[in-house]
Structures are given as structure tokens and as C-alpha cells.
Image (cartoon, rainbow, N blue to C red):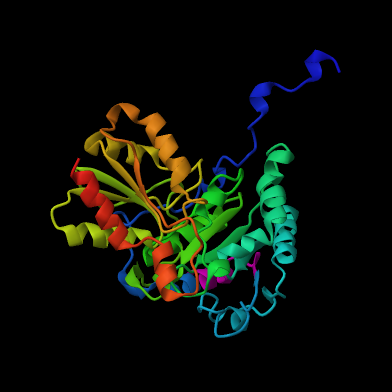
Amino acid sequence: MRAAEWPDPAFANVGVRGDLGEFADARVTDRDTFAGALAETRFIDAVARVMARRMETDASIVVMGEDVHRLGGGTNGATKGLKEAFPDRVLGTPISENAFAGLGGGIALDGRFTPVVEFMYADFMWVAADQLFNQIGKARHMFGGDDAVPLVLRSKVAMGTGYGSQHSMDPAGIFATSPGWRVVAPSTPFDYVGLMNSALRCQDPVVVLEHVDLYSSTGEGPVDDLDYCLPVGRAAVRRAGSRLTVISYLAMTSYVLEAVESLGDVDAEVIDLRWLDRASIDWDTIGTSVRKTNNVLIAEQGALGTSYGGWLADEIQRRFFDWLDQPVQRVTGGEASPSISKVLERAAIAKSEEVAAKLTEMTGY
């Protein structure tokens, strides 16, 4: 080939994901600017209500997965009422994640419908790994960045429920290090509504992570306004502080807050990331906090080997090295996957006790 025909090397990463131009006309808000009424809401009810609202207003949305069409809204009630309201757009599937993930990817590339694919447990991503990581995650980039891939994958983290090693993993670290995916991790009912709306508007594939510990929890949620988006790439400061920065996500955020309060005298700032993928990390919020506290702890429940905090700690130490008084510290689960045994499962994951112990250690330096 003539040298002039080769592409510019600068084009190598063009098209990994879109430019978020689809949010130009979105109604973006956050908790401090939200004008609607709020009330105490069960997390799982927010999950079901926002999906019903979006399917009511957008006829292109189709839902597919195992048992999403029965059992009163799937195994946890996340699709409650959807099959009755939208019988032709809620598709119960066989136990075949690779097949229906691939079907969802094809539907997204076709462009006429927006698929919402549910994996009953996050561990099942390995069954569909080729479709998720070789096909869906890479499709936009492989075709030059011009073709949207509007797919939402819902999956739950079931750590601490006794479901065993094959039904418990936190997949955040895998998805965050796989090109093309955006990763959302809501921890409150209010955030779930806004983040799911953003995920459904986004023209890139988005995995929306849910945690079973949150399903039965309650918090502020919208009463009748289910149409707002939370901004892509904006974290939330759940607690202000000046001595330590603790970064977390999903259910671990509440365990971090519980640990901080239990110690009483730890002046910790707690950041709930909300968006976990490389392109959507809120470096402004993280950087402001690190420059103030000079100490960072990343807290997550998941196993050490597939942890999300590994790559995040590396990024923080290279970006903010001059402001750190000590290496970035981490709380994670153990090396082993959680077992069905109640005792062994608890030993394999992290909760407030592990966070409290690490905070005590760090404040003693």
C-alpha cells in the first residue's frame, strides 16, 4: 500500500465509545437541583417504576432475560407489571445468556429497538463473554465509531446472600477494563431512576449494576417525576470530610458510611462514584477531595483478583502522587469466591467492619 493510504495512528482509539451528543436535549439534574417531590421509596420499587415509565414513553424498548415475564417481576420484582402492560416487549428466555445477549447486541446494532438485557446473576457474564466483550463492547470501534450500540445490560451482585461462588461476583472490575462499556452503579432509589434514564438514552452499551443488599433498602425517591437523567460522569459526595477520602460504589457506600459513623472521630469524605468506566470517572470530584485530604481508601466488596479498585488505585497514584501522604489503601474481599457457607461467605467479602479496621489503621499513621 502507498504510505498515504494508511490511516493516521491518532485514529487508533477513535470510536471506542460515542461523544454523548444524545444528551444535548436531555433534562439533566441531580439531587441538589431536583425540583420534584421526593418520598421514602424502596429501591426495588424504583427499579420497576422507572422501567415501566420508559416502556410507556418509548415503544422501542424491549426487555429480555430469564424469568423477567413471571414470578411477580422476576426473582426480585425488578420487572413487576411489565409483562402485563407490554406483553409483546417483555421476552422470557431460556437459560442461554450467550444466545440472548447476542440477540440483544444484534437488536441494538439494527437500530429499531433498544434492548434491555437482564442477567439474573453477574457471574453469568462468563457464559456470554464472547458476545459481551468481543462483539457488543467492540462493535462501535470496529466499524469506525459511527454506528451506535444502544444496549442496556442489567445485572445484580448477590454477595452475602448464600447463593455461592457462581452467583455472587461483583463484575465492575471486568467491565471497567473492557473497552466500549459504560458502567453504572446506583446506590439510592433517586440515583437509580436518573442513572437508568441516562443508560437508556446513551448510545453506547451500558451495564447497570444492582446489589441485592439495596433491593429491600429505602431512601429518597421521586414521587411522580421519573423522566430526569443524572449527568454522565458525575460522582456524589455522600459525606464531607478533610482527613481521608473514601471512594466506593453500590451497597459498599452504605457500609462505608456505617463504618465512619461507628468510629465517631474519623473525619472522612465519602465519594459514591456512580459511574465506573474509564471514560466516565469523575476526576474533578476525586481530585478536589484528594488535594484536601491527602489520603485515599478505595472500598469494595468484591474479590481481590477481579477487583475494580486495582486499576483505580493505579490511576489515582499517577494522577495525584504529589498530594498523597501515603499509598492508596484498599479494602476488598478475599481471593476466594464467596461460598454457600454463611461463615465462609462472610470471610470472603468486605463490609463495614473491614472498612472500620482499615480507617483505624490509616488514621494511626
Q: Is residue 19 above or below residue 30?
A: above
At which x and y percent is residue 16?
63, 39
Rendered position, 197 above or below 41: above
- Rendered-image quadrant of the N terminus: top right
Q: Is residue 70 visible?
A: yes
Q: Position of residue 268 (x, y in %)?
A: 22, 49
Report the residue that reaches farthest toward the top. 3
In depth, the one of 137 and 27 nearer the eye is 137
Which region of the structure is painted magenta?
Answer: 50-63
Residue 58 falls in image quadrant: bottom right
The answer to whether any part of residue 240 appears in the image is no
Rendered residue at 57%/72% (across/down): 56
Q: Which is nearer the eye, 195 or 74?
A: 74
Decide if residue 40 is on the left or right side of residue 78.
Answer: left
Does 140 lie within the magenta span? Answer: no
Q: Residue at the location (28% across, 35% down)?
A: 326
| Residue at screen point 64% across, 67% down | 59
Residue 247 place in picture, x, y as percent: 34, 48
Residue 220 located left or right of residue 174: left
Say if the magenta span includes residue 61.
yes
Quadrant of the rendered structure where residue 221 is? bottom left
